[in-house]
Amino acid sequence: MDSLELWISLAIPVVLIVVGRVVGASIERNHYRDIIEREARSRTRLAVSSKESDAPGAIRSASLAVGSVVVSVDHFKRFLSGFRMIFGGEVRSYSSLIDRARREAVLRMKESQPDADAYLNTRLETSTIASTSGNEGMGTIEVLAYGTAVHYDRAP
Amino acid sequence: MILTNIESVPGRQIVQHFGLVQGSTIRAKHFGRDFAAGLKNIVGGELRGYTELLQESRAEATSRMVAQATELGANAVVNVRFTTSSVAQGASEILAYGTAVLIE
């Protein structure tokens, strides 16, 4: 009976890690495909970190554009990062998480004002989301992107 | 009300400054959302419940800031900044602040 309990308590984390590996990788792949496609569509509407625009003429209107996303890593990557914490060094399994979140947030900022010509002074802010139940939220981040969406004055 | 996060409103002239205005809100996650997020944590990806929660809070903080600016007689807020800080476990404060101005 004791050995059965031991097996079950060992099997659950292993199953979670395997599920995380398989499903998590496919979610990430789909997300990247989606991001690349949307980035191609919004490439002409530049998000810049400078405050000045290179508008051909005057600016007709300006407003705040905001986009945010909360993303988490899968169990497999969380497990890998646990190993990395022992030896130190770059935690590569988390870099794709941050990259996805930032690109998604910028895209959402652009999509919140889809008819703007440029987004000035784009700022990115990252914060970690802690769970109420201990370290469950480890590897969960929120990225906020915001900037000033401007419309150029075009001669009719 | 026009909001920008640069020092001016492009194409418009600032005629009067009213100083700093701010709006903030502290939100806690509720149990159901936390549970769903816990499940989603296994496979990773976007946690939509949290995204929405934080977006709602940010909209609330912004509208409080705008209300303050309106009270002062401003018609725009420039140099808007957002910050997030966790006050307690499971609760986070969202702050929006900026400079209230009158533009022509």
Image (cartoon, helix red, strand yellow):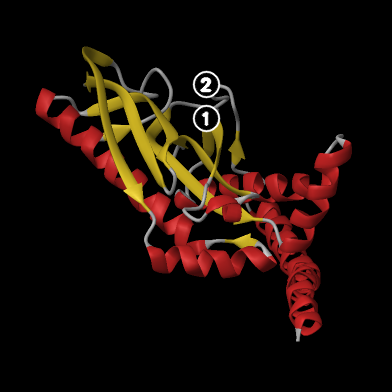
Q: Is mark 1 on a helix, strand or loop?
A: strand
Q: In this figure, what is the number of numbered marks?
A: 2
Residue at which label 2 appears: A51
Badge 2: residue crowd in 10 Å (few <14, some 14–19, many ≥20): some
Asked whether residue A146 appears in the rendered view, the answer is: yes
Q: What residue type is labelled 2?
A: Lys
Tell me which amino acid carries mark 1: Leu
The structure residue drawn at horizontal position 33% and vertical position 48%, both measured from the top left corner, is: B27
User: Which residue is at a point 51% across and 52% down the rendered structure image?
Assistant: A131
Chain of the residue under the numbered disc 2 shown in the image: A
Q: Name the residue under label 1.
A: A120
Q: Which of A14 and A42 is in front in this view?
A: A14
Q: Is residue A91 among what the camera can see?
A: no
Quadrant of the snapshot with the C terminus of chain A: top left
Q: Do the residues labelled 2 and 1 touch (CB within 8 Å)?
A: yes
Position of B8 with respect to B66 (left or right) is right
Q: Earlier in the sequence, mark 2 or mark 1?
A: 2
User: In the image, is residue A18 above or below residue B86?
Assistant: below
